Image (spheres, coloured by chain):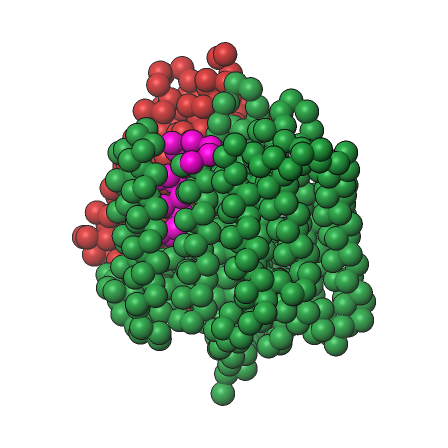
Chain colours: A green, B red
Amino acid sequence: MIIAAASLVLAVAACGAFVFRKRLNVVGPFSLGAIVVAFVLVIVTPLDATGGLLDLELRSSGLGRLASSVILATLFLLVLDVWLDEPAYNFFPTALAVGATSLGVLVLTAPLAIFALLVLGLLVPVGSFTFQVHRNRSVEAATRHFGFVALGGCLGIAALALAASLPHEQPANTFVLLVVVLVVAFALLLAAIPFHTHAALLAGEVPPAALALYFGILVPTTFIAFVEILTLSGLLPAIVQVVKVQDLLHGIGLTSAVGGAFLATGAPDLRRLVVYSVISNLGAALVGIATLSGPGIIGALATVIVTGVSASGQLLAAGTLERLSAPERPTARKAPLAALAFVVGGFAMSGAPPLLGFPGRFFMGLIAYQFAPVTGTALVIATLLLIVGQLRAVLALFGTGVERWTIEPRPVAGIIGSVIFIALLAGGIQPEGFLRPIASFADEFLRALRPL
Amino acid sequence: MIALGIVALATLAANGSRQLRYSAVALLGVSIAANALTAGQLTVTQLAVEGCGALVACGILYVAARDRTYGEDPGWRLWLATIVAAAATAACFATLRTATSETVTVPLIGEDPSGVTAQVAAFWLISSGVAILVTARSPVRGSMGAILMITGVELLVRLLTVPQLGLSLLLAWVEVVIALAGGFLIVNERVVRES
C-alpha cells in the first residue's frame, strides 16, 4: 500500500482540486502541497519493496523512483507557473491526475494494468487542452489527441491481451503481428510518427502549460511505460528472434529523429520548435531501444527523461515570451529572463555538455555507430539539425538586440528555467546518481531479452 | 450465440444512428450483450464494476447530447465501417484466434466455455471501433468508436487467466474517462459550431 501511497495521494488531491478549481488562491497552494507530500512518499518508500493493491502487484524500482522524482519536480514547477503567472483553473486537477497516473504507471508490474493506467493518464489532459474555443482550433486539436490516444490505447491493450493468451506453439508471424501492433500503438500515443498533424496542431493551439504537461510529463512516462511493458510482457525473446521488429523500431525511430529535427530547423514558432525537438529526441531514443543493448537503453531512457524536463522549461518560457510580446513576434526585449531560459533549455534539449542531456546522447550515438554507421550518422545529423533549429530561435529572440536588461514584471518562467538549468548542470557534472538506476533497469531489460 | 448477434446488431444500430442519444442507448445494449457473453467467466463484483462503467459511460454520452436531435449523420461511413469491420473480424479470427478447442461448438443459448463467441465479439467491436474512429469527423462518432473499442478490449482481457478485479476496475475507469473526455469535446464542439 505504501508503494501506491504517492499515487493515491495525488488522485485524492485531484478530486479535491476539482472541487476548488475556481478558487485559485486555494487550489494553487493545495496542489503544490499535495505534490510535496507525494514527493516525500516516493523518497521514503524503500527501494525494491513489493506489495499489492486489489489484485495488482506493485514494485518500487530504482528507475521508478528516479522518474517519479523528476516527474513530481517538473509537475511542481508547472503548477507554480500556472498559479502565479498564467491562471487556468482546469489545469490543477488535470496536473494532479496526470501525476497520479504517471506515478501509478511507474510502480505497477502487470503490463496490461500499466497500459490501461497510461491510457487513463493520456486522456485526462483533454480537459486542459481546450481554451478560448471561439478564437482557435484547440477543440480540434484536443479531438485529434483523443482519437489518437483511444486508437493507440485500445489497439495496444488488445495486442498485449492477445499476446498473453496465445499458446506458445504459435507461428512466429503471429507474434510479429502483435508486436508490430504494439509498436504502432505506442507510436500513436507518443506522436512519434512525424509529419502527422496531431503534434503540430497541439503545439499551435493548446495553452503552453497544458502542452508542457503532455510533452514534459506524459510523453516521457509513455516512453518508460513502453520499455517496461516490453520487459515485463515476455515479448522480448520473440523480438530478438525476428529481425523485422527491430527493423520496424529502427525505421520509426530514425524517421522521427531526422524528420523531427528537419521540422525543428524550419519551425515557424518557438512552441513548434520545442515539440519537433521532442519528437526528434524520442525518435533517437527509439533507435537506442532498437539496438537492444545496455548503452542504447541507458541512453534512450536518460535522453527521454532530460527531454521532458527541458521541454517543460522551454514551453513555459515560450508561453511567457508569446504573451508579453503579443501581437508581435516573441523577442528577448520584452522578457529577457524567459528568453534566456528558452535558450538554456535548448542546450539541454540538444544534448550539449556539460548538461545532463549529454551522457544519454553520447551513449546512443556510440552504440548507434557500433550497430550501423548509417544509423550513427543519421543520429549525428539529427543532433546537428536540432542545434541549427535552436540557434535560429536564439537569433530570432536576440537578433534585434536588447536595449535594456529590464527583467519582466513576473519572471516566473525565467526563474523556473534557471532552476531547471542549474539542476541539469549539477546532474551533468555528477551524472552517476542519475544513470545508476537506469543502468540497473537496463540489466533487467537484458535479462528479459535472453532468459536463462 | 444470441448475445453475439445482439452485440452485432446493437453495434450497427449505434453506428447507423444520426442521433447521439440513440447511439448511447445502443452502446448500452452492446455492453449488456457483451457482459452476457462472458458472464460465466467473471465474479459478480467484476461484472458489477464493468457494468457500472458501461452504464456511466453511456449515461455521460446521453447527457452530453443535450437534446434528441444532436448527432452526426454517418452517411457512407456506416457502410465503410461495416464492411471493414466484417473483413477485419474474419482476418483477426483466422490469424489471432487463441481459443484452444479444436472442434468449436457454439451453443445458441447459454455459456460458451471455449471463448470463441467472446473473441469474435471482441474482434468485431475493436474493428468496428477502429473503422468508426478513423473516419469520424467530430467527437460524436469518435467517442462512439472509442467506447466500442474499449468494450471489445474488455472482452479480450476477460479471456485471460490472470487476476481480473484490478484490471476490470482500471478498464471500467478508462471507459468512463473516454466518455467524459468525449462528452467534454462534444459539448465544446457544439459551442464552436453554434457560435
Image spot of residue A20 (x, y percent): 27, 33
Image spot of residue B72 (x, y percent): 49, 22
Up the image or down, A444 lies above or below B195; here it is: below
Residue at 38 percent across and 67 percent down: it is A109
Q: Is residue A85 magenta?
A: yes
Magenta residue span: A84-102
Quadrant for residue B67, please give it: top left
Residue at 49 percent across and 87 percent down: it is A452
Q: Main secondary structure of the magenta part?
A: helix
Up the image or down, A82 lies above or below A215; here it is: above
Residue at 78 percent across and 56 percent down: it is A384
* Quarter the N terminus of chain A occupies: bottom left
Q: Is residue A119 magenta?
A: no
Q: Does any portion of residue A233 appear in the rendered image?
A: no
Nearest to the observer: residue B17 or residue A67: A67
Nearest to the observer: residue A446 or residue A349: A349
Image spot of residue B94 (x, y percent): 53, 58
Q: Does any portion of residue A276 appear in the rendered image?
A: yes
Residue at 47 percent across and 32 percent down: it is A86
